[in-house]
Amino acid sequence: MITKPKGCKDIYGHEAKIWKYIDSVVDSVMEKYNYTYIRTPIFESTELFHRGVGDNTDIVTKETYDFIDRGKRAMTLRPEGTAGVVRSYIENKMYGDLNPVKVYYSGTMYRYERPQLGRNREFTQFGMEVLGSDDPMADAEVISLAVNIYKMLGLKGIKVKINSLGDTESRNRYRDELVKYFAPHINDFCCDCKERLAKNPLRILDCKVDRENDILKNAPTTIEYLNEESKKRFDEVKEYLDLLQIEYEVDPTIVRGLDYYNHTVFEIEADIKELGNNNILGGGGRYNGLCEMLDGPKTPGIGFACGMDRLANALELENIDLPLNEALDIFLLYVNEDEKKYAAYITQELRLAGFTVDTEYTSRSLKSQFKQADRLKAKFIAVLNSEDLDNNEIKIKNTKTKEEEIISLDALIYYLDEKLGMETEEDFEHICQCEGEDCNCTDCHCHDEK
Ligand code: AMP
């Protein structure tokens, strides 16, 4: 048997419905914030990630899927979304459009990592980027957008952790201080950290191997080295977050793994034990130098990326009841060839009218067809009968109330429309939970009666 590659997943059935639902919430929230969808290639030239993610990052040194194509060009499967979006911004001269450019993406990413719960080799991220604004309000907007997506999905106990790396001057000062601090102890650290000390000491701070080392835990923090301007900027981001009523905590240990970040960096965590160290649902930050690093015009930017795999896990682990609409409107059952033809025709008509409909395709017994309708959670079933059909009639049963009715075939669409619509009205009242006269809401039907 040919099996899927290690660290990859097949997503189907109920899980696929969860994924599609997350997609729909992401689309709708992004739209509300006026972000437009962008699709960039799954593979890009290797150089893009060396320059855009950073030559010394774990991602580029150890985790990329690189290949030489048939034209002998060095290519890499994208390990993250930002570099491709910024490449596209520059190549398509989007900076000529109205700034800021606010875009969002969703797609598979590839990193050669050790697979475990919440960590795969092929995984999906959705994310957004704002290019062309250095305003602290944009930082707060990106964080609030991410939080609102999690809230819309019903996730509880999410934690926003923010930090600032400051501008280039602050970051350099901090870097020098870290080198001085770590140098006498570096022999107690892993081989990668020894290399990081010279190339990018900030990266020692998010080393997965040395994370419990006390020297690392007591290292100086970025906040202590922010210059006045960077401090003021960070304060403004926090003010905007307060204004938007986004709860957060300042965590000076957050530095993020990629080379391109400055000023605001942040992570959003789920409060789910089972996810262990892989409970970070997403993270992001400001990258004001990235566009220039990729030969584009000087353009500030900020973005966020969220792992879909972890998010879907989190929703399942928190047992969140998502409105997945897994039920069929109607299932058509039949026995003989004549009825089968009617089934094909009626199914088509109902689908074109907008109903979710299914029927029998494998010549099963009527008993098995009832079981199938049950499995598919059909709200209505109709057992087609040649005699009824010849009289232009159809017998329909509500699977919940067990009510049965014979109706005219011509009235089937209206009948279902009315019955299924009535169910929606009941749902409305249920959601509203109004208490009659005191209800101030504008959506519910009690107003019609007042
Ligand atoms: P990063 O691009 O490393 O900042 O990651 C942002 C988010 O993507 C993380 O918080 C995870 O939710 C998700 N993520 C990153 N790497 C993986 C992976 N190997 N498998 C699954 N999700 C991942």
Image (tube, grey):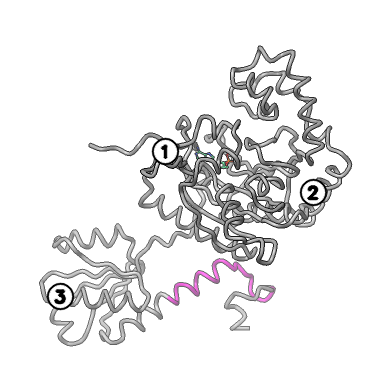
Question: Quick check: 326 above or below 224?
Answer: below
Q: Which is nearer the N-term, disc 1 or disc 3?
A: 1
Residue type at mark 1 is Phe
Q: Which of marks 2 and 3 is in front?
A: 2
Residue identified by numbered label 2: 238
The quadrant of the rendered image in which ligand 1 is seen is: top right
Q: Report helix, strand or loop for mark 1.
A: strand
Residue identified by numbered label 1: 67
Classified by dominant secondary structure, the portion drawn in magenta counts as helix
Q: Residues within 10 Å of mark 2 (few under 14, many from 20)?
A: many
- For this rendering, which residue is in front, 158 or 45? 45
Residue type at mark 3 is Glu
**The N terminus appears in which quarter of the rendering?**
top left
- In magenta segment, residue 100: no
- Tell me what residue is drawn at x 58 percent, y 60 percent: 92
Q: Judge from the rendering whether residue 108 lies leftward or rightward of residue 267; answer left or right.
A: left
Q: Where is residue 228 in the image (x, y as percent from the top left)?
A: 89, 41
Q: Which is nearer the N-term, disc 1 or disc 2?
A: 1
Residue type at mark 2 is Lys
